Amino acid sequence: MLFLKYVVASLRSQAQYPGSAALLMLGNFLGTGVEIVALLALFHRFGDVRGWRLGEVALFYGLVNVQFALAELLSRGFDVLGTELIRTGSFDRLLLRPRSLLLQLCAYEVRLSRLGRMTQAALVLWLCIDSAAVRWSAANVLFFLWAVAGGVALFVGLLVLQGTLAIFTVESLELMNVLTYGGVQAAQFPLSIYHGGLRRFLTFVVPLGLITYYPALTLLGKRDPLGAPEWIGLASPACGFLFLGLALLVWRWGVGRYVSTGS
Amino acid sequence: MSAAAPGSVPGAVAPRLAFGERLRPFRAAFESRFSSMLQYRSAALAGFATQCWWGGIKVMILAAFFRGGDAAAPLSLADAVTYIWLTQALFALLPWLADSEVALNVRTGAIVYDRLRPVDAYALLFARGLGWLVARTLPRAALLVSVAALGLPLLGAQRWALGAPHGAAGGVCFAVSLGLAALLSTAVLMLSSAAVIALGTDRGVVALVPSIVLVFSGNLLPLSLFPDSLAALLLLQPFAGLLDIPLRLYTGQVSGAPAVAVLGLQLAWLVLLVALGRRAVARALERLEVHGG
């Protein structure tokens, strides 16, 4: 498969500098993992937060970080579209190749270092399994995978939108980091601890809340303190795919209006 | 300037100059870096937006925890909110990475020009680094403070606003401490720069330094909210002086005689780190090999 060939090529190029790859991965692990230090310190000092125990919040944390780490692995090409591809003119070359543009961008520089976030998120999920907040029955494991897929779709959708913006601004907008990295930050805690305005934003505008909060409730077997019916949990990961679909429509519209920088 | 000073050209004859005159090259280095960094307006705006969002989320998370057990906290929620906003305002003042210019100069070989200048190499790098940090901080801090201190009360969100300093004495101590923090931050930056020069790449620094700064400066969480058993240790380590000590003075967590003590602590770390940095930079420059250019 062509996608795998691209991935293998980028992995081999990183393997040329093993020390550098290892350091970058360690940096990513530590840089994303320190958030858990704050979480532990806050729980140590204050105890439960509005009825949420540490093991439960750890599920939100682990879930959103696994989702984002996978999405980052898959859509690096959209992330650096402005700075590395459009400004340099390389994007024209991608457009000329008789292969799918999406495939080329998704497989562009799959970076090992992103596994750092993945590793720390997996460790936190381990903590959460240990605390017995979730019963890992076969149905729950399947549902967990469905929830992860929905989240990956949502984050890829956000990065696709960031790439679409870059077509017009010819730079990678740092502002989108508010939604991606900032979204991860916000979704590490249950939606119900936030104030109404932010909660509505995270539900209806950028459905980050939907793809972590409701699925995690279902996994925990908890009723929503805000009173949403239970079927929402099962269906909510689909919102991620819906968002991705809309983002891809915007993307196609944007690519149609692409004007090369000519350099 | 003696011929033995690191960075000076051996054998160069330096005329004796007045003190102000001797500082001139460093002031020029500071000013040129300062004004060039002020040009990056869109980066400043993006940084501002990011800090606003981050601050808002952190304030809400802390508020949720405080409602669980206010008595368990060594500072009030209002002080914690003020602390968070100032953390966001001063985000760019922390030594997250090595000065990007140093890594670039090592790679391109342009660092050779710096070696040839008849001035103290460490002081020159220090002046540039300070200019870089301060210029990146000022616009973001001004925007964020005006929104968090004036904008939020106007919107009726008085409870979530950045509060005033703890009395006039608190304000003065904060101002002094902030100045020391800027210098201390530059001193840490110089240690990173020495590592970049010695290793020839900024990869190692990028991997380790940000996490250490994030946790131990208080940017992640006010240091006093960590478990009480760690309190003394966290206050005494050098990174507390980058952010946590100025903010403790601002919110009045430390006042009176202890305030003078923590200022002394900041100064002591500054002297120590500058001494270490001078040696590290001098050694790194001595062993530097430039591959063409």
Image: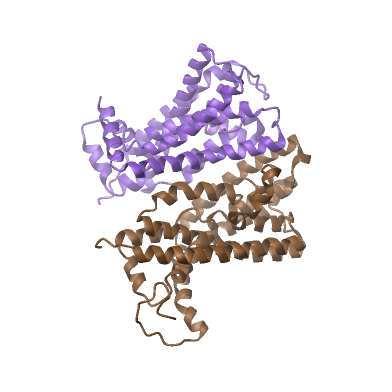
Chain colours: A purple, B brown
Q: Residue A165: in sight, yes or no?
A: no
User: B263 or A237, which lies in front?
Assistant: B263
Left or right: where B288 falls relative to B137 = left
Answer with the quarter of the image where residue A232 lies: top right
| Residue visible at 47% across and 47% down in the picture | B208
| Residue visible at 71% across and 36% down in the picture | A46
Looking at this view, name the residue that lies furthest to the top: A138
| Residue visible at 40% across and 46% down in the picture | A172
| Residue visible at 43% across and 59% down in the picture | B193
Percent across and percent down for residue B65 are: 70, 37
Percent across and percent down for residue A222 are: 64, 19
Answer with the quarter of the image where residue B53 lies: top right
Left or right: where B82 falls relative to B105 = right
Which quadrant is home to the N terminus of chain A? Answer: top left
Percent across and percent down for residue B61 are: 65, 38
Q: Residue A174: in sight, yes or no?
A: yes
Percent across and percent down for residue A23 are: 40, 43
Q: Is residue B283 above or below residue B70?
A: below
Q: Is residue B288 above or below residue A62?
A: below
Left or right: where B71 falls relative to A151 = right
